[in-house]
Image (cartoon, rainbow, N blue to C red):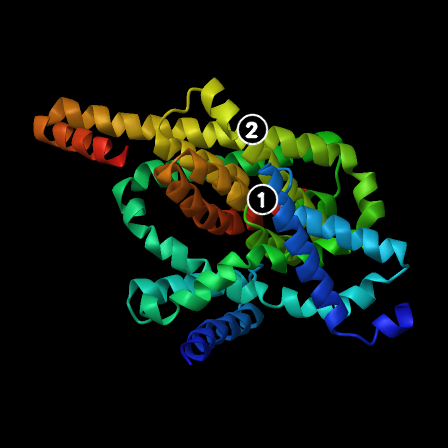
Amino acid sequence: MKYVKQFSIILGISFLAELLEILIPLPIAASVYGLVIMLVGLITKLIPLEKVETAADFLVDAMSIMFVPATVGIMASVDALKEMLLPICVITVVSTVLIMIVTGRVSQHIIRGQKNKGAATLQTVGTEAAADDKEDR
Amino acid sequence: MNEILSQSIFFGIAITLVTYEIGLWIKQKTGKAIANPLLISVILIVAVLLLFHIDYETYANGAQYISIFLTPATVSLAVPLYRQLELLKTYPKAIFGGIIAGVLTAMVSVFALSLMFGLNHEQYVTLLPKSITTAIGMGISEKMGGIVTITVVVIIVTGILGNILAETICRLCKIEDPIAKGLAIGTSAHALGTAKAMELGEIEGAMSSLSIVVCGILTVISVSIFANFI
């Protein structure tokens, strides 16, 4: 009966998150509150990982299927879609490419900065970082 | 047809699972990102509904019971994030710096282009959460008054695009560090991009899946500010 217990915890948190969504006047969906509650629970060990792991992995695995019904609803929004088809295409392509470049370059810059600084000031830290780096690869 | 099926609960559930299974099979056979099971499933269902003149409501009557599991599934995203927490502690500056820069780029680029195209508020907030995971993006679009179904489609197309372009862009822009690559892919193309990141390597994959959740949460905060601009 371990599934019953695991699903009880996850669905219980979902319910708590729903209450928060209703009570807190912020434009935040219940699922985000729930995600934060679960994460805090795991970090503080109030919720042991093995008590939710199996059910959570199942739900995350099956998540794509849960988007199907909402997406089929596009049938009802065809007119709205037609109206903004060109902007959608341009915005999707341009912003996706930009986000990828900016995120990658900024984080790479910070990582390399950290490594260089470590190597220049403290030899030991530098070799340690290099060793870490090797391990990472 | 419609009258009989509208009394059925399992029609919507069954057709969703069966078409998704077909999508998984096609994905396995071709191995292409464009053969996305979710996309295939949706196209097949829309085709069946149009062909047999079945209303969306008839389908949704049963299919809604699949959608309700989205909240617990999003809550469960905390588990893979928790597993990667060690990584987050190793390079906190690079990870947060990169993702914050990415989220701001997303907001500013969508805002500037929406302004250029003269989109209204509804259309603008429909597109704002386009680069984050569908579960959180859907919630944002709904809360802000966007068109949720279009948001979902745009999010999926973004993911497929990121998946296909990732390697080329990283090479062209000299993004070589595995951590930076993973962050770039996860922040721009959520779970569908992460599938590509996993192919590139373990660090890329872990970083990409970490970015999905961190970027999702940061986007919730920034959208609540940016949504007021149009």
> Residue drawn at (75%, 48%), measured in percent from left and top?
B43
Q: Are marks 1 and 2 in contact (CB under 8 Å)?
A: no
Q: Nearer the viewer, residue B118 or B2?
A: B2
> Residue drawn at (42%, 33%), measured in percent from left and top?
B200
Upstream in the sequence, badge 1 or badge 2?
1
Q: Is residue A24 above or below residue B126?
A: below
Where residue B114 sits in the image (x, y, percent)? 69, 35
Where residue A111 sits in the image (x, y, percent)? 30, 30
Q: Nearer the viewer, residue B127 or B78?
A: B78
Where residue B3 sits in the image (x, y, percent)? 90, 72
Is B67 placed left or right of A63 in the picture? Answer: right
Q: Is residue B203 above or below residue B20?
A: above
Q: Quadrant of residue A49?
A: bottom left
Quadrant in the picture for the C terminus of chain A? top left
**Residue A83 visible to an observer of this rendering:** yes
Q: Which residue is mark 1?
A: B28
Image mark 2: chain: B
The type of residue carrying mark 1 is: Gln
Where residue B59 sits in the image (x, y, percent)? 78, 65
Q: Nearer the viewer, residue B116 or B219?
A: B219
- Dot 1 and dot 2 within a common chain: yes
- How busy is the neighbourhood of tag 2: few (under 14 within 10 Å), some, or many (20 plus)? some
The type of residue carrying mark 2 is: Leu
- How busy is the neighbourhood of tag 1: few (under 14 within 10 Å), some, or many (20 plus)? few
User: Callout 2: helix, strand or loop?
Assistant: helix
User: Callout 1: helix, strand or loop?
Assistant: helix
> Residue drawn at (82%, 55%), measured in percent from left and top?
B48
**Residue B115 visible to an observer of this rendering:** no
Q: Is residue B77 above or below residue B222?
A: below
Q: Which residue is mark 2?
A: B165
Is A58 placed left or right of A79 in the picture? Answer: left
- Cα gap from disc 1 to disc 2, whole angstroms: 20 Å
